[in-house]
Image: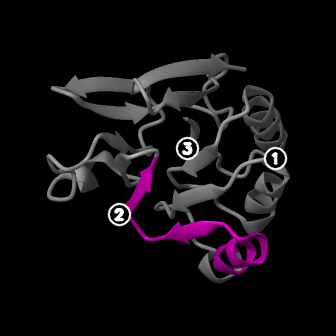
Amino acid sequence: MRIGVVSDTHNNLKNCRRIVQIFNDAGVDAVVHTGDITQAKTLAVFAALDAPLYGVFGNNDQEREALEATAQEFGFRFQDPPLDIVRSHRRIIVVHDPRDLEGVFGKEHDLALHGHTHMLRMERQGSQLIFNPGECAGHMVGLNAVGVVDLDTLEPNLVHF
């Protein structure tokens, strides 16, 4: 099983459409957004995904009522961090700010996902993986990337666009 990981889309609709295409072409089984969607119209773009969408709200997600309504409309599961999910026998903790991992990322987790920094992070802690695919909002030209994590091997791959 493979999951797509995206963060900090910051209302870049063009990039979000490309991200949906990347994940659909990759045939991921689920997608996780680690926050900073910004506006409901951006979240609505993800309705074209061929996989379920999970996520957390970030510090720039100020239109909460509209974001929550859009998430509900499309059957997305979004909440304030932390989000604890299990996919393919792997326990995954999702936050926006990596500082929020302290106290919630435990030995029972296989994978921690975060955003906020717009910087790539692929860090192993024993058998655990902490992952942030980095920039995808177009703020840092040439660095747009999303991630695909193989949950069987816990191997992350970057897809640049």
In the figure, is residue 107 to the left or right of 72?
A: left
Provide the residue designation for mark 2. 82
Q: Nearer the viewer, residue 20 or 128?
A: 128
The residue shown at (74%, 68%) is 40
Give the image location of residue 99, x and y in percent: 24, 50
Q: Are marks 1 and 3 in contact (CB under 8 Å)?
A: no
Q: Secondary structure at mark 2?
A: loop
Dot 2 amino acid type: Pro
Provide the residue designation for mark 1. 13
Q: Residues within 10 Å of mark 2 (few under 14, many from 20)?
A: many
Q: Nearer the viewer, mark 3 or mark 2?
A: 2
Residue 7 marker: 3
Dot 3 amino acid type: Ser
Distance between mark 1 and mark 3 Cα atoms = 13 Å
The residue shown at (76%, 57%) is 42
82 shown above or below 101: below
